[in-house]
Image (cartoon, rainbow, N blue to C red):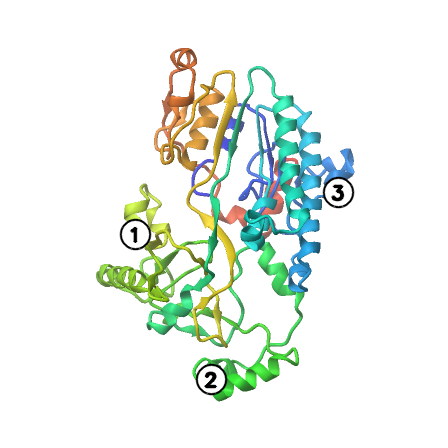
């Protein structure tokens, strides 16, 4: 995270934050209570650790469900495990709610996990009953918060995306391979990991790898492919995935969550291939390539964008060069060695561009805002404004004045301040430096 987070800004102003399951919070950046989420390293996600002495809730707390249940085909067991995780999260929330705080931020992830697996079934009322119990638990959590609000509290309820039914999963790097933009790494066969859930699922299977030469031949030779498939049945052929070999690739999808294609630019990457003078030509080719992709006679992408058309600011260069437009497909960055069709037609729930926003409090106007007025970028300015803090001038998003009482706005006009870069460095996130940081914050002894 290149800029100061909202909770760093609040902490500097002596405001107390409690963060429960907010992604990207490991390692903790303040001395306030933080229960970390995605990207957590190691076994501990509870900071400070002495919270475990207060309640067994924090001793038993888990970030992710048991993905091995999915691997075994036990969908019902997986759903029940999600239910158990969210029950513990709710109990943790109730425990922490009793402490002194100025900003309490909690994320419930179970709806996302369920929707990826059984979104269509839930919409049609055909999902296992345990899945609906998870959403009833969320209703309970909302009811608890609503009853616990004080007169001067404001509730923001936000989803950072929605869900929709996808036709299946499109393997972008396989398409790039077929068009000559990418070369696979045959010496290190493995799927690209996105986060701990995928790592855990992958590690569950302690399989031996097949010879890289078999993998290389298997991509283009039907006979060798049949041999590998036969070996696979004996448990010796997993993982049959490849990652791009960046030193020989022109462009690639770096992770399944990036929703775009990155050009292997010499100015950005140590093993880059593309000269600055070639970038625009490659970008045009990639965009045209995406817009030409069809499945059963229908275009896959309604649009595709250059990163400069989507993002602004000093960190635009960090974004993928081509951003996917709307589509009815999910995306994967994995390259499968024994599949010739990049289109995996499996009904699946995928993220949609539109989420939900609800705001409640004594200074909030009762009204409905139309689609497209509010952005997820507006949440940080709203949090800072409602806590009567100045908003950094270069912060994306806005204060949503349409929903704030006129008298409150007049008494508390929106104020801005100069932007200050954080003093933390990237090295603070590596190995021993993380431990030193946690000890300096009083999280560990």
Q: Which residue is mark 2?
A: 217
Q: How many marks overall?
A: 3
Q: Position of residue 12 (x, y in %)?
A: 51, 27
User: Who is closer to the viewer here, 76 or 60?
Assistant: 76
Question: From mark 1 to mark 2, how far is it between C-alphas?
Answer: 35 Å
- Answer few, some or many: residues within 10 Å of disc 2's Cα (few below 14, many 20 plus, some between 14 and 19): some
Question: From mark 1 to mark 3, how far is it between C-alphas?
Answer: 46 Å
Question: From mark 2 to mark 3, how far is it between C-alphas?
Answer: 49 Å
Q: Position of residue 26 (x, y in %)?
A: 57, 44
**Which quadrant would the C terminus be assigned to in this image?**
top right
Q: Are marks 1 and 2 in contact (CB under 8 Å)?
A: no
Task: Give the residue at x 64% y 22%.
Answer: 147
Q: Determine the secondary structure under disc 2.
A: helix
Q: Which residue is mark 1?
A: 305
Camera-near label (1 vs 3) is 1
**Can residue 430 be seen from the camera position used here?**
no
232 in relation to 323, above or below = below
Q: Are marks 2 and 3 in contact (CB under 8 Å)?
A: no
19 in relation to 203, above or below = above
- Answer few, some or many: residues within 10 Å of disc 1's Cα (few below 14, many 20 plus, some between 14 and 19): some
């Amino acid at each position: 995270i290149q800029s100061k987070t909202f909770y760093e800004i609040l902490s500097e102003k002596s405001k107390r934050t409690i963060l429960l399951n907010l992604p990207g919070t490991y390692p903790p950046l303040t001395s306030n209570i933080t229960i970390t989420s995605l990207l957590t390293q190691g076994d501990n996600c509870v900071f400070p650790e002495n919270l475990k002495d207060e309640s067994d809730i924090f001793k038993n707390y888990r970030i992710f469900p048991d993905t091995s249940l999915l691997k075994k085909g036990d969908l019902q067991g997986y759903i029940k495990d999600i239910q158990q995780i969210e029950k513990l999260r709710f109990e943790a929330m109730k425990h922490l709610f009793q402490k002194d705080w100025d900003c309490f931020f909690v994320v419930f992830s179970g709806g996302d996990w369920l929707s990826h697996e059984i979104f269509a079934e839930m919409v049609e009322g055909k999902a296992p009953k345990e899945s609906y119990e998870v959403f009833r638990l969320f209703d309970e959590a909302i009811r608890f918060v609503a009853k616990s609000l004080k007169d001067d509290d404001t509730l923001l309820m936000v989803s950072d995306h929605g869900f929709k039914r996808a036709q299946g999963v499109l393997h972008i790097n396989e398409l790039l391979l077929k068009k000559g933009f990418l070369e696979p790494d045959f010496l290190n066969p493995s799927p690209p990991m996105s986060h701990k859930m995928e790592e855990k699922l992958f590690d569950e299977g302690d399989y031996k790898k097949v010879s890289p030469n078999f993998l290389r031949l298997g991509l283009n030779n039907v006979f060798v492919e049949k041999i590998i498939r036969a070996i696979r049945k004996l448990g010796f052929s997993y993982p049959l995935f490849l990652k791009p070999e960046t030193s020989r690739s022109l462009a690639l999808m770096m992770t399944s969550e990036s929703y775009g294609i990155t050009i292997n630019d010499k100015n950005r990457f140590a093993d880059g291939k593309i000269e600055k003078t070639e970038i625009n030509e490659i970008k045009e080719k990639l965009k045209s390539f995406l817009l030409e992709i069809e499945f059963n006679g229908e275009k896959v992408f309604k649009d595709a964008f250059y990163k400069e058309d989507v993002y602004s600011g000093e960190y635009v260069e960090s974004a993928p060069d081509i951003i996917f437009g709307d589509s009815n497909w999910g995306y994967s960055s994995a390259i499968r060695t024994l599949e010739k069709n990049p289109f995996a037609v499996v009904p699946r729930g995928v993220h949609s561009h539109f989420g939900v926003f609800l705001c409640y409090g004594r200074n909030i106007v009762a009204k409905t805002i139309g689609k497209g007025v509010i952005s997820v970028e507006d949440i940080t300015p709203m949090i800072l404004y409602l806590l009567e803090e100045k908003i950094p001038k270069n912060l994306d998003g806005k204060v949503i004045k349409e929903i704030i009482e006129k008298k409150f706005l007049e008494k508390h006009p929106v104020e801005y301040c100069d932007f200050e870069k954080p003093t933390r460095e990237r090295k603070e996130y590596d190995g021993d430096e993380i431990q030193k940081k946690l000890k300096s914050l009083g999280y560990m002894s």
